[in-house]
Image: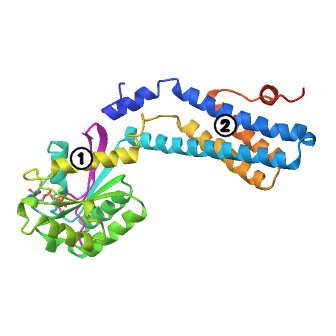
Amino acid sequence: MIDAETESQRIAALSSLTGKLKDLFSSWREEIVKNVALLTTVIDFGEDHDIEEVAHLFQDVDQNIQRLESEIEEYLKRVQGSEVLLKGIKLILVGPPNAGKSSLLNYIANQDAAIVSDIAGTTRDIIDIPIDINGYKVVVGDTAGIRAPSAADTIEKEGIKRAKQKAIGGDVVLIIIPVSEEETVDYNDLLELVESLKRENKELVVVLNKQDLLTQTEETTISELSKKLNLSPEQFKLVSCKTGYGMEELTQQFTNIFKKISLSDSADPIVISERAQDLLKNDVLYGFSQFKIWKENEDVVLASESLRQSVEGIGKITGQAVGVEEILGVVFSSFCIGK
Ligand SMILES: Nc1nc2c(ncn2[C@@H]2O[C@H](COP(=O)(O)OP(=O)(O)OP(=O)(O)O)[C@@H](O)[C@H]2O)c(=O)[nH]1
Ligand SMILES: [Mg+2]
């Protein structure tokens, strides 16, 4: 528990200590062995089966394997979600200069982590601050204000370039726009960024800051900007770092996004080693994909060989090797062959 800094990390650490994982892997392994055994009955006792029966058997195995495949893929997705939890969710703040990016960071971090000033271009390079938002470990990256390079000096230009790169590498990106100084915002540039973030499927929230200086209604402001940036109105949040307006709603939205990307709401987070993940992908799932190819070619022997590779993959994780006896054992006990 020493490294568990937040609640979600603590849960993740706990769940890795249980023997549930091994049971799960063993049950997958058993299931695949059973299917290898099913195919073996065709190989070894093929003459006694008519063609239709063989095709039927193949169909059954295919269905079982498909079911298992989606289960394992789903599982790997959850593992990746849990990894995001452990490493910390990367939340990147970008936007025009003077928008209040550093102010927002200070507000959510509840400390003066970044320098705030009314001089545009105050933050010139990226700073990462680890904070806890509703139990989630989050690393907030504050960046240099994005404005037209012609208006920025050399150091600032480099900062802007890095800000954009940083945004692309984040898990969640907040674009901060000041509602009071819209003329300073380069919407073409921001639209370009929005489009590239969409392509990368990043979670994106546009934070409209300085609500205390707003001169028109919230609805009008949001509807205008959602058109300009080609985003839905739900992706906008109006706040004020000065008065705290909208901050609770914003943090609530963060939590919803964190739950979504870490998949930690559906069940306990899971942690397995890098090696186990590789084996699941490169041996188990790969074996399944090979099985499908040989099944298409109606080659029972190679289809069954492919599944053996999957069994061996899991065996490397759980420390179980597969022997002929085991497969034959399942064949004889399950299918009453040889009587
Ligand atoms: N009225 C008002 N002023 C704000 C608000 N948030 C920030 N400010 C002010 O806006 C100015 C710029 O804030 P910063 O947080 O430094 O802005 P930034 O986006 O980090 O700016 P750069 O680092 O230059 O890119 C400061 O003078 C803040 O005090 C707000 O909600 N309302
Ligand atoms: Mg700043």
Q: Residue at x 17, y 52 (%)?
A: 104
Identify the image quadrant of the N terminus: top left
Q: Is residue 242 above or below residue 85?
A: below
Please name the residue that numbered disc 1 is placed on: 252
Which secondary structure, mark 2? helix
Residue 99 on image: x %, y %: 16, 62
Q: Secondary structure at mark 1?
A: helix
Q: Is residue 123 magenta?
A: yes
Left or right: residue 22 compared with residue 90: right
- Identify the amino acid type marked 2: Gly
Quarter the C terminus occupies: top right
The kind of residue tagged 1 is Gln
Q: Which stretch is magenta? A: 121-149
Numbered circle sitting on residue 24: none
User: Residue at coordinates 6% horizontally, 63% vertically from top-left?
Assistant: 213
**Image quadrant, ligand 2:** bottom left
Which residue in the structure is indicated by mark 2? 313
Asked if the stretch drawn in magenta spans residue 263, the answer is no
Q: Is residue 106 visible?
A: no
